[in-house]
Amino acid sequence: LFKFDLSESMPLHISRINSILGIIYLATKNKQVIKILSFTGFFALLSFLYPSRVQGITHPLGVSFLVNHTITLLLPFFAMIAYDFRIQKSDKQIPFIFMMVYMMTVYFINPLVNGNYFYLVMRPFAFLNGLPDSLYLAICAIVTFALFSVAEVCYYSLSEYLTEREFTSKQYQSINQP
């Protein structure tokens, strides 16, 4: 009943961390938390493009994967509309630092628990397997920065659009009240 395999059961996959961040944000409305989730949540897009060992959509784990990653992607938009959250230029800095600390943490935890958190051990593409860890980590950092840069442009553009349209939480609340 309580067979937990630390290599898979720890809340160290980025999607699990994002779920926890989402819960914390909904409970506290902390802008730093949603800022981090907004950027780290963009990894959910990559998981749809290249799902790793995901069960079929009819399997409970497949449904969980789909629901979790979809909510992770939608929560920042909800925060923008319902709570007037906005992404500003250069907001990716703190989430990027968070990701670098996360990546280095799981780099050292993976061998201790025989894990593959952030796919640092079993890499997503075969051609990456022969690379030294230092080069692979540098590539991960570059991809993360590029992904966060795309996210920043998308969120900032949406923030500008919502601000120009003066679409605020007050309007959202008036729409949803009888």
Image (cartoon, grey):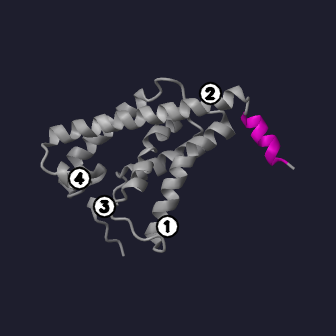
Viewer-nearest of discs 1 and 2: 2
How far, Cα to Cα, is label 3 from label 2?
40 Å
Q: Secondary structure at mark 2?
A: helix
Q: Is residue 23 visible?
A: no
In the rendered structure, which amino acid carries the disc numbered 1? Answer: Val
Q: Tell me if mark 4 has few (under 14), some (14-19) or many (20+) residues whose alpha carbon lies within 10 angstroms of its own.
A: some
Task: Please give left or right for residue 115 compared with residue 70 in the image.
Answer: left
Which residue does the numbered mark 4 point to in the structure image?
Answer: 123
Task: Please give left or right for residue 56 compared with residue 10 in the image.
Answer: right
- Please give the range of residues in magenta: 168-177
Which residue does the numbered mark 2 point to in the structure image?
Answer: 160
How far, Cα to Cα, is label 3 from label 1?
18 Å
Q: Is residue 95 magenta?
A: no
Q: Tell me if mark 3 has few (under 14), some (14-19) or many (20+) residues whose alpha carbon lies within 10 angstroms of its own.
A: some
Instruction: Specify the label residue 112 is tagged with.
Output: none
Point 66% across, 37% down: residue: 83
Asked where in the image residue 87 lies, by quadrant, the reply is top right
In the rendered structure, which amino acid carries the disc numbered 2? Answer: Glu
Point 20% across, 45% down: residue: 108
Point 23% across, 35% down: residue: 138
Point 62% across, 40% down: residue: 79
Which residue does the numbered mark 1 point to in the structure image?
Answer: 63
Q: Position of residue 85 (x, y in %)?
A: 61, 33
In the rendered structure, which amino acid carries the disc numbered 3? Answer: Glu
- Mark with earlier residue (3, 4): 3
- Mark with earlier residue (4, 2): 4
Which residue does the numbered mark 3 point to in the structure image?
Answer: 8
Asked where in the image residue 77 lies, by quadrant, the reply is top right
- Mark with earlier residue (4, 1): 1
Q: Residue furthest right?
A: 178
- Mark with earlier residue (3, 1): 3
- Mark with earlier residue (1, 2): 1
